[in-house]
Image (tube, rainbow, N blue to C red):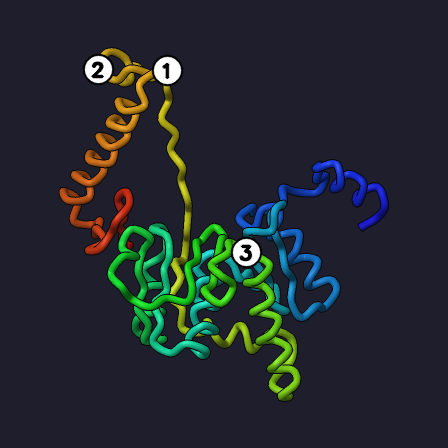
């Protein structure tokens, strides 16, 4: 990073890409940097460092479901049998990995009142908090856990690069294609007129819930769509081609 770029960053300007662990261009940039410099690990944060992701020495991204799987495996070594709390958009493959391979319980935010002991709460967005860190939403602390694991393996003479991290997520089933769609409710849409007043937050919420209900009915009527048996937010379903 040259002086000009450092100055721009100090002003809150980012000339190369958005500082976002979920942004494709940002992840592409750090992947290229890792490979070009033959680095053991690449780390990326958002602007306030409460979200993070990593790239291993082969250029494989360790974010979203992979990061949750990796952190779950690390926490399991320290706290066997603990519960992992996640958000609602995690994959079926991640659930299988955590519950079947690691032998842990995976819960979602809205069901975190059942009294199960937990040491990790983490979202696919890169937000994550650990009990040992006083449940602070701290992306930097997540990366410290990865670095500690990497350093420990290196001190023990185990492998090179970041293979020890990659091996921890071995067996995680991932979809061949993953696409995220975010649908915005258009305030000027005719469906929001009349019975759904634009200025009414309650009616706005009702409209959103009605859309979710239509989606739920669609999944029930289509045999190709399989609704998640346990879900506490929105509508979650999967399909197999």
Foreground pick, 58 / 92: 92
**Disc 2 or disc 3, which is closer to the eye?**
3
Q: How many marks?
A: 3
* Residues packed near mark 2 inside 10 Å, few (<14), some (14 to 19) or many (20 plus): few
Q: Is residue 203 visible?
A: yes
For the residue labelled by badge 1, is the local secondary structure a helix, a strand or a loop?
loop
Instruction: Tell me the CA gap for discs 2 and 3.
Output: 43 Å
User: Mark 3 against mark 1, which lies toward the viewer?
Assistant: 3
Residue furthest toward the right? 3
Q: Which residue is mark 3?
A: 138
Q: Could you tell which of marks 2 and 1 lies nearer the N-terminus?
A: 1
Q: Which mark is residue 195?
A: 2
The quadrant of the picture occupied by the C terminus is bottom left
Between marks 2 and 1 in the image, the one whose residue lies nearer the viewer = 2
The numbered mark, 3 or 1, whose residue comes first in the sequence reads 3
Q: Secondary structure at mark 3?
A: loop
Q: Check disc 1 and report the residue beneath it.
A: 188
Identity of the residue furthest to the top in this view = 194
The residue depicted at 76 percent of the width and 41 percent of the height is 10
Residue 211 horizontal/vertical position (percent): 25, 31
Instruction: Tell me: residue 47, above or below residue 150.
Output: above
User: Is label 3 in contact with label 1 (beta carbons under 8 Å)?
Assistant: no
| Residue at the (31%, 55%) spot, across then down | 108
Query: Which of the 4 image quadrants contains residue 212?
Result: top left
- Residue 214 is situated, as x and y percent measured from the top left of the image, at 20, 34
């Amino acid at each position: 990073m040259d002086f000009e770029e450092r100055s721009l960053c100090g002003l809150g300007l980012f000339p190369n890409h958005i500082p976002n662990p979920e942004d494709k261009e940002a992840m592409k940039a750090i992947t290229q940097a890792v490979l070009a410099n033959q680095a053991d690990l690449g780390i990326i944060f958002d602007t306030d460092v409460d979200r993070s992701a990593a790239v291993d020495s082969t250029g494989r991204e360790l974010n979203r479901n992979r990061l949750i799987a990796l952190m779950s495996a690390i926490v399991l070594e320290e706290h066997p049998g603990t519960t992992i709390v996640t958000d609602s958009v995690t994959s079926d493959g991640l659930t299988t990995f955590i519950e079947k391979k690691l032998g842990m319980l995976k819960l979602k935010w809205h069901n975190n009142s059942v009294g199960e002991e937990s040491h990790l709460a983490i979202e696919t967005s890169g937000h994550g908090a650990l009990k040992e860190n006083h449940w602070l939403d701290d992306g930097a602390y997540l990366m410290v856990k990865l670095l500690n694991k990497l350093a420990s393996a290196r001190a023990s003479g185990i492998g090179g690069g970041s293979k020890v991290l990659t091996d921890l997520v071995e067996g995680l089933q991932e979809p061949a294609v993953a696409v995220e769609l975010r649908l915005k409710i258009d305030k000027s849409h005719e469906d929001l007129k009349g019975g759904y007043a634009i200025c009414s937050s309650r009616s706005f919420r009702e409209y959103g819930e009605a859309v979710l209900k239509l989606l739920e009915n669609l999944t029930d009527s289509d045999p190709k769509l399989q609704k998640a048996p346990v879900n506490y937010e929105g509508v979650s379903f999967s399909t197999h081609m």
